[in-house]
Image (cartoon, rainbow, N blue to C red):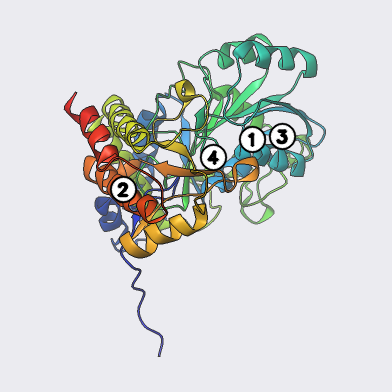
Amino acid sequence: MTSPVNPPPRLLMGPGPINADPRVLRAMSAQLVGQYDPWMTDTMTETMGLYRDVFRTTNEQTFVVDGTSRAGIEAALVSLVEPGDRVLVPVFGRFGHLLVEIAERCGAEVHTIEVPWGEVFDPSAVEEAVVATRPKVLAVVQGDTSTTMCQPLEDLGEICRRHDVLLYCDATASLGGNPFETDLWGLDVVTAGLQKCLGGPSGSAPITLSPRAATVIDGRKHVEAGIRSDDDDDEDAAGVRIASNYLDLAQVMDYWGPRRLNHHTEATTMLYGARECARLLVEEGLDAAVERHARHGLAMLEGVRGLGLAVFGDVAHKMHNVVAVEIPAGVDGDAARSALLTDFGIEIGTSFGPLHGKVWRIGTMGHNARKDAVLVTLAALEQVLRAGGVPLTAGGGVGAAQEVYSS
């Protein structure tokens, strides 16, 4: 007989997902209501307002896409990009390559610039590529967990405005734990996910659209025949129909907007979770949350250094919430991760592409950006490394982290 779901206790200290905040899980246990119940539509409206605060924007078109963070990325690109449009992607890790693939699947003419993994782009290099390729969309990742790098965005909005380019940012791994300013930085579209710094489960993708991005997308709106009214625009006058029905942001904007035009059945339980993630973040304060991630991230950084481990990449541009640790010579990285999981119930991450088997990725994000999680992880990692024959100073990792906390 099949047993009930009963996952083992785990401390998820990888690059995501992380342990969801218990308050988010409690919110997700609430009973369902009908999707057009006034309480439900009020909850959707509240969620929009909360995510305006999270994204630091006044954008009317701020809501959640029902699906994981990748659904948000696909919704943004398939709704912005028509076949033949040029898209420029600065690639500095795995998730830049993902933006390239999704844009190509949308039929875009994709151009890339690249830096070695572990580095970020200077804004002048991005502007040079914008001038050379004249894209409709510049698509960039803020925090790429594959390398742990955090791309500076402050100058990119102004560059895009000067060259009449739409700026899309994937902030899945960075939002809530690193400085982020949608309006101040001039970002047109931003998408994220709950399973990193927002402290929830994967399955809902917050998104915000600037008025000029919303106008571009709305210009491609084709209302489904079964729900179209006489007041809808002439379908023949609309732009190229968005290739996805489910991820059609022109329709989803009507679904979340005052019209509440039927699109799909809302993922009610995920909506509860997304709302609670945003509520908790706003309650804590965005600046306080970023500082919390910075503090615990620094403690983990200094802790792994205290164990004598080298840190990968340009630390000056590292995300607050994840560190890439070079695997010591002679250590089987996968076996060490397995020992951490089996003996201590702690999960850390491996990496991809050129970094696979060379680094571990250790996260301090969301509900797990806290002192006890950092210290327990460092203590357990010390024991695993000792068992693997790595010479260490006893308590060096925990001691270095404690120095950060006492400063």
N-term mark: 3 or 2: 3
Which of the 4 image quadrants contains residue 232? Answer: top right
Q: Is residue 150 left or right of residue 402?
A: right
In the image, what residue type sits under mark 2? Thr
N-term mark: 3 or 4: 3
- Which label was assigned to residue 96? 1
- Per the image, the residue denoted by label 3 is 81
- Which label was assigned to residue 377? 2
Q: Give the alpha-carbon distance from disc 4 to disc 1, as whole Å.
A: 26 Å
Q: Is residue 83 left or right of residue 382?
A: right
Q: Which label sits in the foreground, 3 or 4?
A: 3
Q: Is residue 244 left or right of residue 60?
A: right
Residue 186 image point, x, y percent: 52, 17
Whether residue 69 is visible, yes or no, is yes
N-term mark: 4 or 1: 1
- Per the image, the residue denoted by label 4 is 253
Q: Which label sits in the foreground, 1 or 2?
A: 2
Q: Which label sits in the foreground, 4 or 2?
A: 2
